[in-house]
Image (spheres, rainbow, N blue to C red):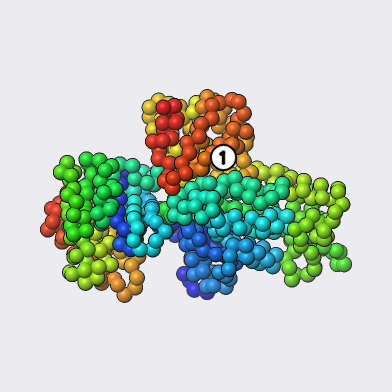
Amino acid sequence: MSDEATKPSGTVKFLSGNEACMEGAIAAGCRFFAGYPISPSSEIAEKMSGRLPRLGGKFIQMEDEIASMGAIIGASLAGQKTMTATSGPGFSLMQENLGFAMMAEIPCVVINVMRGGPSTGNPTGPSQSDVQQCRWGTHGDHPAIALSPSTIREVFDTTVACFNFAEMMRTPVVLAMDEITAHMREKIIIPQAAEIALVNRRKPVLQAGETYYPYEAGEDLVPPMMNFGEGARYHVTGLDHDRTGFPSAAAEIQESLHRRLLDKIEKHQEKLLLFEHHRTEDAEVLVVAYGSTARSAKRAVEEARAKGVKAGLFRPITLYPIPEKQIEAAAAHARRVVVPEMNLGQYKLEVERILGKGPTITGVNRVNGEPIAPSLILSAILGD
Amino acid sequence: MSKRYEIRLAGSGGQGLVLGGVILAEAAAIFDGKNATQSQSYGPESRGGASKSEVIISDAEIDYPKATHIDLLLLMTEAAAEKYLKDVPETALVVADLDLVPTPIPEKLRSVKVPISRLARETVGKEFVANIVALGVLRELTDVVSFESLKKAVLARVPKGTEELNLKALSVGQEAAREYGGKTTAH
């Protein structure tokens, strides 16, 4: 293990989002990456392939994204913190195994650097069109945790948070970046290892002769997880299952499993919600924006304030679960709400649902591979 | 420089403009201690196709990382000139490759044409250092970053074994700026 390989702490660097994502994953303890490189996420795989072997970790370039998900699920069951990185078309292929990881409660992290879609769409332009796929990409009533960073330092921090949330909740977590955040470079101070709080999955404490039930949850609704090879043999399946992990068709078992998978997110929601208020306390026009679009929105809010308009920005960093109460609070004085996003209104749907028939809600939407300029958001704020 | 200073480097894929932007921004952010962002847009091709790299330098926090009011524009292809001369404010300085951009630059704009690629090919000896020659030109014309910082940033980013070649490219650019452009001070 070379000095350089373990050095990421406390240093000032000039990094892209994809590079900062790799640094965050390493700092969080990720030592297994399986993936299939795809624009605009490729640098994450490239950088992981350089760093992981020097740390005694494993990098595997897989044959496709379905297998990539399978590999990180398997390695996670064996006790590793695992990650893959992809973009829209690959994220679509991952959905089946993502559902498996949610059902079988296997922590892992999926980085999705969004690009225009559907299908192969626009490989190199920025987009935020996978927001609803982050929530509803796989079938069934499933839990979903997805974060979206705006700055390079925040890419580092949210990547660490993804691992922490995955370990805490025993579920896959998605980091939804856009191409601007992924490829833009800016100054980042990478924190010292001692400054970074890490969460590790809770393991069972068994008395001699006690049976391990891999899906028996206590009050916190998250079952303790034993790594494969560390004692008990147990069964893992995507079928509805009882506490032993074996399939069950009993109605009450199915019902309680599905409810618990959602309830565990609900129960711990406060710990999962990351967000930023910017001048929302008296905002008569509220902008709700995330990812790189929030940077445009911040400028637009400042320009509106300079014109005497009481504008504010609420920025969800955790897209799912949705910071609903916080959005309501930010909109308390708003007569209008503007939701700019590089898609045709995916998060606006959520804002409309939360705020109901209160303020007028307007989208500023672009799907042309260009970022949303501050002037477009300013026009919407001013009601032009 | 307390205000936001916006630079756009435009040309085609393979000319090293993304790396050029990274080096310029790193010189400002790491070695000059300011805030800087570098971003880009490019096509799916690894060579050819339009390529654009943007650098924002400011003493304040940088929110929107893309150019909205260009201060400095580098044009390395005719196609880039056609695309980007349209929305350049009159306060901007335009630097274009003398051989690769035959289009006359509108007279209302401050502009300098320098045979950047030719100098890289004939004087330095390798055309692929044209991006570094261009950085030498831009720095000398604008003082947007200090020469020492730019030198450090170049050395931090270029492949091992090419340090001397790249430093030569930088000084060839610097001299060419004096020869072709005189000194223009940045705002």
Front residue of A140 and A149: A140
Q: Would you name the residue on which mark 1 appears?
A: A347
In this image, A222 relative to B20: left or right?
Answer: right
**Quarter of the N terminus of chain B within the rendering:** top left
Would you say residue B20 is visible in this rendering? yes
Type of the residue with mark 1 = Tyr
User: Going by the image, does A231 lie left or right of B47?
Assistant: right
**Looking at the picture, how far across and down is residue A273, in whole percent?**
61, 44
Tell me: residue B116, above or below residue A308: below
Q: Position of residue B138 (x, y in %)?
A: 23, 55
Q: Residue at x 47, y 52 (%)?
A: A122
What subunit carries mark 1?
A
In this orientation, does residue B144 appear?
A: no
Q: Position of residue A226 (x, y in %)?
A: 75, 64
Q: Nearer the viewer, residue A358 or A56?
A: A358
For image coordinates 66% across by 51% down, the residue present is A138
Which residue is nearer to you in this view: A278 or B12? Answer: B12
Q: Is residue B77 above or below residue A384?
A: below
